[in-house]
């Protein structure tokens, strides 16, 4: 059948996650730049859910803050489960947020990040409220220990779910398990939740008990999904396993969109990263946060980019680190360059070996090829910054700015003691310490006079040889 309209989703994010052994709520542990719970919530939005309610409990304020925003303009609603009274109680906590909603409610979990839109579309296609109020996902495991078993009766129809702790020895032999993912008619759901009782080994309100209620009023529709998709996260080892699957999916998506990954197995691309076609990423590249990489760009081996933009046809050479930087088109960065927050490189800028920048704008065509620190600087177009140049921006209390005009030539081993300005076209002699403004077109040199003493080296060697003999 066609997708029910409207669809709402309830995502359970209230659990303690004790097995994580962490002071952080389980659903906040990151996978490739996003909290764990972001993935099922985002999947619900991609599926077309008109309302998504995240049920929070443990560290509720922190979870709300982490899950507010980041969903392409969609807004997550929140509901509070004040006490941990089971999954049935958790879903019921969302009822107020869905007051007046009629249609199908999709129930997901904040610690199950691998479900795909395609699988959920199959679940919605199987759901037919004319035949029954509930459809569910099952899977088969070689070792189903700990999972609720699917109970089927005559004609192989689903009759209910029994949790592992409540199952008989015979029921524990059943390999088909409940994934806990349901789509349920809203009116039936709220009524079924009201009828739950804590008559079980855990003394909780089991959401799974609504399956037996649904079986009494109609047919429970079932689809089977790969166990990988329905796998949750209980500890850090499982978190790493799920992250590896998501990493591979992200890499595959970019490769199919025209991006070359020379060694996908060692490439890490966060979920929010955007990359243009014909761009190449070398081995061991890590793109973190909301990076935007243009088309026909190259990111060299071992480079790490965080919240950084790289323009079309630019190259970041190996082992460079860029953080909160903007690199324009046709730039060359590295190798071993360090671009710190606030760096802006305009078109055609070259920042080379062991150059560090911070809160610096390098305008069109400027070059800083070697071993320099450029901090709190505005550097004009077409400048040449010699090796070993330092903008001395900190006086021990405050930071100060260095401003260079267009076409300035800075000789090697120059210190520019801010605040200082150098006018257009000026030259600074190598080895200078510049403490005063330099006019446009001027030459500034601040060296001591060079002294030459003929024969000094030989005399010195003889003195040292004599001292050694004594």
Image (cartoon, helix red, strand yellow):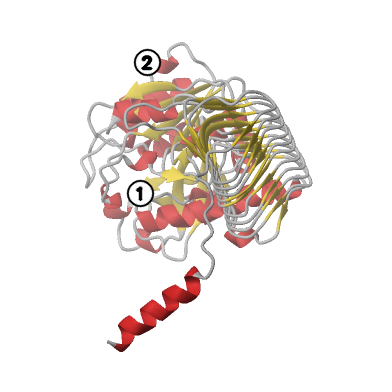
Q: Dividing the image into 4 quarters, which one contains the C terminus?
A: bottom left
Secondary structure, mark 1, is strand
Q: Dividing the image into 4 quarters, which one contains the N terminus?
A: top right
Relative height, residue 198 to residue 253 (above, below): above
Q: Nearer the viewer, residue 357 or 454?
A: 454
**Residue 295 % position (x, y):** 76, 40
Q: Nearer the viewer, mark 2 or mark 1?
A: 2
Q: Is any part of residue 295 visible from this angle?
A: yes
Few, some or many residues within 10 Å of mark 2 (<14, 14–19, 20+): few
Q: Is any part of residue 220 visible from this angle?
A: no
CA distance separating discs 2 and 1: 29 Å
Q: Nearer the viewer, residue 114 or 262?
A: 262
**Residue 64 % position (x, y):** 37, 26
Secondary structure, mark 2, is helix
Residue under label 1: 162
Image point (41%, 56%), residue name: 238
Image point (69%, 34%), residue name: 328
**Residue 407 % position (x, y):** 72, 31
Residue under label 2: 96
Question: 223 left or right of 195?
Answer: right
Q: Nearer the viewer, residue 51 or 38?
A: 38
Q: Nearer the viewer, residue 261 or 316?
A: 316
């Amino acid at each position: 059948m066609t997708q029910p309209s409207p669809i709402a989703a309830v995502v359970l994010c209230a659990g303690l996650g004790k097995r994580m052994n962490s002071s952080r709520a389980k659903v906040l542990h990151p996978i490739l730049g996003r909290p764990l719970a972001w993935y099922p919530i985002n999947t619900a939005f991609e599926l077309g859910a008109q309302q998504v309610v995240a049920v929070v409990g443990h560290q509720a304020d922190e979870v709300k803050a982490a899950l507010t925003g980041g969903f392409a303009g969609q807004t997550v609603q929140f509901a509070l489960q004040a006490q941990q009274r089971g999954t049935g109680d958790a879903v019921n906590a969302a009822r107020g947020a869905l007051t007046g909603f009629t249609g199908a409610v999709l129930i997901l979990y904040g610690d199950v990040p691998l479900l795909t839109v395609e699988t959920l579309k199959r679940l919605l296609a199987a759901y037919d409220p004319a035949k029954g109020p509930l459809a569910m996902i099952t899977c088969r495991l070689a070792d189903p220990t700990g999972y609720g078993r699917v109970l089927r009766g005559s004609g192989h129809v689903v009759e209910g779910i029994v949790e592992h702790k409540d199952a008989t020895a015979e029921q524990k032999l059943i390999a088909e398990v409940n994934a806990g993912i349901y789509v349920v008619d809203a009116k039936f759901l709220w009524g079924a939740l009201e009828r739950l009782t804590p008559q079980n080994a855990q003394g909780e309100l089991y959401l799974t008990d609504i399956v037996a209620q649904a079986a009494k009023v109609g047919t429970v529709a079932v689809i089977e999904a790969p166990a990988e998709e329905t796998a949750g996260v209980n500890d850090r080892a499982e978190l790493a396993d799920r992250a590896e699957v998501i990493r591979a999916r992200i890499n595959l998506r970019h490769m199919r969109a025209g991006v070359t990954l020379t060694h996908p197995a060692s490439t890490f691309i966060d979920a929010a990263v955007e990359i243009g076609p014909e761009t190449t990423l070398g081995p061991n590249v890590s793109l973190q946060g909301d990076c935007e990489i243009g088309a026909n760009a190259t990111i060299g081996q071992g480079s790490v980019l965080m919240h950084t933009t790289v323009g079309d046809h630019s190259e970041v050479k190996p082992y460079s680190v860029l953080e909160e930087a903007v690199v324009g088109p046709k730039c060359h960065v590295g190798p071993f360059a360090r671009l710190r927050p606030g760096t802006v490189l305009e078109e055609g800028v070259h920042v080379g070996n062991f150059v560090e920048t911070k809160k610096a704008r390098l305008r069109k065509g400027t070059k800083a090829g070697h071993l320099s620190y450029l901090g709190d600087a505005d550097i004009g177009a077409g400048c040449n910054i010699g090796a070993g140049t330092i903008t001395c921006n900190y006086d021990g209390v405050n930071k100060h700015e260095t401003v260079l005009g267009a076409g300035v030539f800075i000789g090697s081993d120059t210190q520019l003691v801010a605040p200082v300005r150098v006018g257009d076209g000026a030259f600074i002699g190598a080895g200078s310490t510049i403490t005063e403004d330099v006019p446009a077109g001027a030459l500034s040199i601040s060296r001591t006079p060079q002294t030459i003493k003929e024969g000094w080296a030989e005399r010195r060697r003889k003195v040292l040889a004599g001292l050694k003999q004594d």
